[in-house]
Amino acid sequence: MIRKFESLCLVLFAVTGFCSAQIVAAGEAAELLKKADRGTSFSGTDFTATYSIVQYKPGQGTSETEVVLFRRDSKSWHTILITAPEKDTGKGFVQFDSNLWFYDPHDRQFTFSSAGNKFQNTDINNSDFAPQHYSRDYTVTSAVNEKLGSLDCVKFVLVAAVPDTDYPQIKLWVTEKDGLIRKREDYSLSGQLLRITAIPSYQLSKNHSVPVKILMVDTLRGKKINGKVEHDKTQITITDVSFEKQRDFVYTKEFLESQGR
């Protein structure tokens, strides 16, 4: 299933606009990037959804993890509760007061985590579950019109403006008509490609656009299979989307402890 979705992403997101790329005016680019930021945030409401995560490691096959994500972006709170597989059920993360904590019900201990850490050995960063702040944390060095498959996008080249970003350089493709992020490439300071993220489609719920599926490819981790290098991949499917208000208790350590018993 993950390979089929990867093939779909490659077809949809083939870049076809090299010859006709036009520079986007700085003011227009800045406004579109802010719109993209707003599209990753659900301020004014809580957000809850089930994230079904399939991790593919070449030569090892796939593993599946399911989590329920709770977010209250107005206070920068979020809770991630792992509900599958059984061996990891009850584990989770909770963020409040700018701190991210991991809870393991087996030893009933909380340990401090980082937004930049990988989630459960997948290609997902912990920070990917939270709102993004490209216009605040990055400087736009380039913004051009570019065709991404059939989508009219603006391709941004961004360089970190603050020291604590996950990646020092990012390329971001944002559709002009709706400000939705369609593709992202993460780079090291030396310019090495580290990770590719594709978001081909969104679902509309309560006037909010939420990704249907997300594909991430780790370009550093992989294995040669039948003479060809295959990279680690993670597919995320988002369902059960809700914007109902949750109890404050959901965003506490005590909530994770109660779920892990």
Image: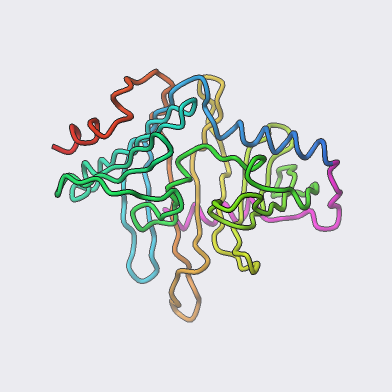
Give coordinates of residue 140: x percent, y percent.
74, 48
- Residue at the spot 37% in from the left edge and 43% down from the top edge: 100
Task: Judge left or right: residue 60 versus residue 138.
Answer: left
User: Foreground: 131 or 241?
Assistant: 131
- What is the tally of numbered marks visible in this picture? 0
Residue at 44%, 48% in the rendered image: 115
Q: Nearer the viewer, residue 179 or 116?
A: 116
Quarter occupied by residue 63: bottom left
Q: In which quarter of the image is residue 77?
A: top left
In the image, what residue occupies the spot 39% across and 60% down? 56
Q: Position of residue 255 (x, y in %)?
A: 24, 30
Question: Which residue is drawn at the image coordinates 47% and 45% (left, top)?
Answer: 127
Is 19 covered by the magenta stretch?
Answer: yes
Q: What residue span does the magenta drawing correspond to?
A: 1-25
Q: Tell me which colouring the rendered structure shows.
A: rainbow
Q: Looking at the figure, which quarter contains the C terminus? A: top left
- Is residue 184 found inside the magenta-colored segment of the image? no
Q: Residue furthest bottom?
A: 227
| Residue 20: % across, % down | 86, 52
Pick whichever, 67 or 141, lies toward us: 141
Expressed as whole percent of the image width and height from the top left, the position of residue 87 reads: 18, 50
Relative vertical location of residue 240 with respect to residue 168 in this rendering, above or below: above
